[in-house]
Image: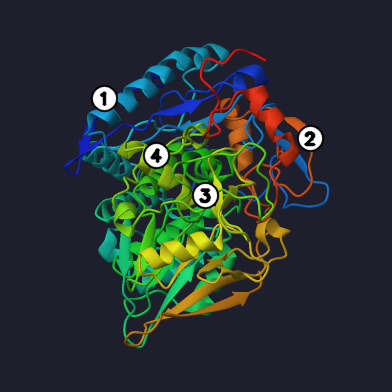
Amino acid sequence: MAEAKVKASLSTSKGRNRLPLLGSVAVAASLSVLASRSTRTGSNFLAPTSSNANTLPTQIDAGVVNFQDSPPSASTSTWYSSGISTTAFAASAIASAMGVAAAARGQRRSHRSARTAALKRRLAVAQSATEAADAWMPRMEGWTDEQLEAERQRAKSFGSPETAYTGPRYKGPSSVDETFLKGLLESQAAGILLPKEDAYLIVLDVIDLLRKETTMGRVSIPEGKELTVVGDLHGQYWDFLNVLKLAGMPSEEAPFIFNGDFVDRGSWSIEVILSIFALKLKYPNAVFLNRGNHEMIEANILYGFCGECGAKYDMGLFDLFSEAFRNLPLCHLVEDRVLVLHGGLPGPDPRIWMPGQTHDPTDAIPLMALPSLDQLRDVDRYTEITPTDYSDSIGPTSEDKYVRDQRILIDLLWSDPRGGDGYGPSYRKGKGVYTFGPDVTDAFCKNNNLQCVVRSHEVKAGGYQWDHPKLVSVFSAPNYLDTGRNKGAYLKMRRPTKDGDVEITGHAYTAVKHPDLPSMHWQEHIHANYPHLLQRMRKKNVQNHDAFGDSDFGGFMNIDEWEVDEAEAFQEAFKLDAYGREVKGKESA
């Protein structure tokens, strides 16, 4: 295996500068080490671990710990590390990747240099704390055209599938016709996976497509036809098939937007994402994809997709999926009137964090300046978000493009609506993730001549919900985690009449039966084969909170929520500045 290392050199791809993906893995023996920022080492590929790579495993190995989580209940057990309330990581696990971002400007190069130096310092700690410093790690750097071509040639050398394989074969984008799509959907439902070579080549061809797209795509609805918007699917393959049955298959006359969170949690994420990618290859100008917060390395390692890749194919395919996810657009503008994105609208600027702020609708950071659609279009999406980036995003207004882009990326992937005006704290991550009120939505729509905003990201009991007069949420994974009891939904949009609005209707449905495999099943593969990516955790009983600190169930308070009357003591004890950041170099209390 290749020696773990951190690379900081720039590579050029598609005529633009790309900063290698810098990552971090915390491998430490105590929670005190977890509280410090952590470092990910280098990557190498593993060969398939099963002689029958095209057959779905169907049973849980005896003795392997099941990491399945549960939806919120009155007595949810939450795993958390002392001092880090919103990360569900602990003493020996992934802390995720630093960013892959363009670095043409000197300011951005200085950001890269500082972060790389910090990674190198922490890398020694991570390597000394693990018994397998050369163990597999997610690929840290972006891919050049030459590297992707080499990977393509490697995939072609995998050899033919077993003679018993009867499913479709992928021979390039032109081979994806109606027969291929029908065969793919039916084969996967029967538990038969595409050959590994075909899976690799599909992802590589989708990367080529996505690299040509922009951060904000534009979508037109064919006259007399409808556009379908699908929300979070989370690896629920049989519910995905039901959506295609109810809403109809995508086509040039029936465009689709898949609005992020295709993978994780559910145990058929491979089947969902390969189906969506095949649809994208068949209809590149009618199937549109947005990135969600679960199209990130950090989430994929913790919530099942990384393990699923390793169990069904190999970890090399996961690295390619990560490259595809980094190239996904962040939003799409429909008929210049409706903005479709995964999470929510940009947070406050300056980026203030108020110690002691609660979820009381009257307790809010007031509405501030909002970015324009042109500023959203200009965001460099080709990056990853690390666990420390959320709190690091707090601070004054910045003219540094890297800082601005990172803040907007966090918001578009993570933020949620709130009932009261202004901005409030999010229950999802800790510092640096916000909720936004109806006044924010109204101002953003007015400033940008929008009818409304469509987003996903949160479970809705009825599948969809108008959270604000100009903001609707749609969630397409019914009975989420097999216990949510929520409906799923998709939206249909019709082209507006002259000077009129886009017509939006919601269509709800219930969950369908699926094979007896629990949610988060493939996290076992990480636990059994890559324990260096995981952390031990201390347990605390908390009401109404996701067991992994990353809930899609809306409206729940963070586990370290501070009451208003504690704010002054909090400020004094932790020596925070005017933006809610810890004062550098403060003495211990």
Q: Nearer the viewer, mark 3 or mark 4?
A: 4
Tell whether label 4 touches label 2 (CB within 8 Å).
no
Other-residue count near label 1 (Cα within 10 Å), few / some / many at <14 / 14–19 / ≥20: few
Q: Reply above or below: 69 against 183.
A: above
Q: Label 1 vs label 3: CA separation?
A: 30 Å
Amino acid, disc 1: Ser
Amino acid, disc 4: Thr
Q: Label 2 vs label 3: CA separation?
A: 25 Å
Q: Label 1 vs label 2: CA separation?
A: 43 Å
Q: Earlier in the sequence, mark 3 or mark 4?
A: 4
Which quarter of the figure has residue 41?
top left
Per the image, the residue denoted by label 3 is 414
The colour scheme applied to this rendered structure is: rainbow
Find residue 9 and name its label: 1
Q: Reply above or below: 452 against 139.
A: below
Per the image, the residue denoted by label 4 is 397
Which secondary structure lies at badge 3? helix
Q: Earlier in the sequence, mark 1 or mark 3?
A: 1
Per the image, the residue denoted by label 2 is 540
Which secondary structure lies at badge 4? loop
Using the image as rendered, state which of residue 408 and residue 365 is in the foreground: 365
The reply, left or right, for residue 13 in relation to residue 263 is left
Q: Earlier in the sequence, mark 2 or mark 4?
A: 4
Amino acid, disc 3: Trp
